[in-house]
Amino acid sequence: MANTFGKIFRLTTFGESHGKALGGIIDGCPSGIELDFEAIQSELDRRKPGQSKIVTQRKESDKVEFLSGIFEGKTTGTSIGFIIQNEDQKPQDYSHIQDIYRPSHADFTYDKKYGLRDYRGGGRSSARETVSRVVAGAIAKQLIPTIKINAFVSSVGEIFIDKPYQALDFSLTETNDIRCPDLATAQKMEALIKEVKKQGDTVGGTITCVVQNVPIGLGEPVFDKLHAVLGSAMLSINAVKGFEYGSGFCGAKMKGSEHNDLFNADGTTQTNLSGGIQGGISNGMDIYFRVAFKPVATLLQSQTTIDKDGNVVEMLGRGRHDACVVPRAVPIVEAMTALVLVDFVLMDKHVRI
């Protein structure tokens, strides 16, 4: 099983949703970086469960403990080991699905691939694994402080922000439980999530990420295109079903005369339908992309499924689950973005931050 992400700045994660703890090992972090531990914990607090009424009520403090690679507040250049204890495990909530495959979960595929599965909340396939990514992403952000990464919820169900990102005030993202910088739209999204939750159902949505102050030259022209690695990073997040950057799928409807980004004399472009990336390499313009998340698969409704013997059975979801995952996924999207960018910065000695 592959558990490592990155080439120079590498994160290896471990742990299960209802095991004793989760954690990670970061290799390739330069020495002498003075870390802001409050900023790291703040990122974890943005992701943690139980933070509002519209998310899962599992209670986890998600306090990170660093075990190695840091001395007197600075990185030493050796492996950074860290751990986050699971404090509110309730594996008994999943005893009813010990021999049952939940629809649209990884239960069936894990069992067929490995010959066994951890049915306690999905084990390794649970989105709780992303807590380790957020720790590493928070450190990565501190290595590239001039690059600004802002993700936000841009849609829930059929409710979308109808403004371009340039018209949004990113400082408002954290002022509401949805993490949407358009406050009027955030209220509508919250009302929809609450209504869906009452029905024992779930709803999907999208997260938009805007990356500013990106230097020219990040990415490679063939197999390690910047947008390709960003897409891979986003698609590795639980429940993600789609990724598009720049004009995305809308660009397929346009003519070249409409889509081309014409240059200004200083090398910037008059438009940015390329999404800040051309030929797989950053061009200095804003990078922006959108990530689609499916509805959470666990419903508090009866569904028909099968057990490990192939018998058709009825099951009813139990436990504590998000009715919509996107508000808590915002810091995860930012973390994976930071991991991609810091890796390219460290790989390319010609790029200055």
Image (cartoon, helix red, strand yellow):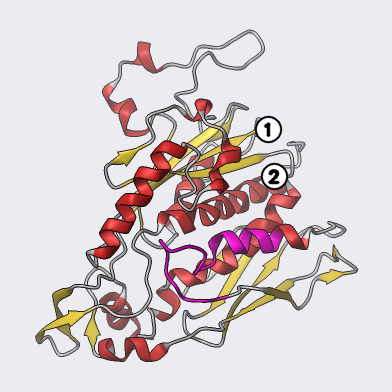
- x 63%, y 15%: residue: 267
> Are dots 2 and 1 in contact, CB under 8 Å?
yes
Look at the numbered disc 2 and give the secondary structure of its residue. helix
Q: Is residue 79 left or right of residue 224?
A: right
Provide residue 37's location: percent of width, then percent of height: 76, 63
Q: What numbered label is drawn on residue 193?
A: none
- Tell me: residue 61, above or below residue 199: below
Amino acid carrying mark 1 in the image? Pro
Asked if the stretch drawn in magenta spans residue 46, the answer is yes
Q: Secondary structure at mark 1?
A: loop
Around disc 2, counting alpha carbons within 10 Å, would you say few (fewer than 14), some (14 to 19), or many (20 or more)? Answer: many
Q: Nearer the viewer, residue 142 or 45?
A: 45
Is residue 91 placed above or below 33 in the rendered structure? below
Tag 2: amino acid = Val
Quadrant the C terminus occupies: top right
Main SS, magenta region, reads loop
Q: Earlier in the sequence, mark 2 or mark 1?
A: 1
* Magenta-drawn segment: 40-60
For the point 34% across and 26% down, the residue is 251
Q: Horizontally, is 29 left or right of 275 in the view?
A: right
Q: Can I make out residue 85 in this image?
A: yes
Q: Which residue is mark 1?
A: 215
Q: Which residue is mark 2?
A: 345
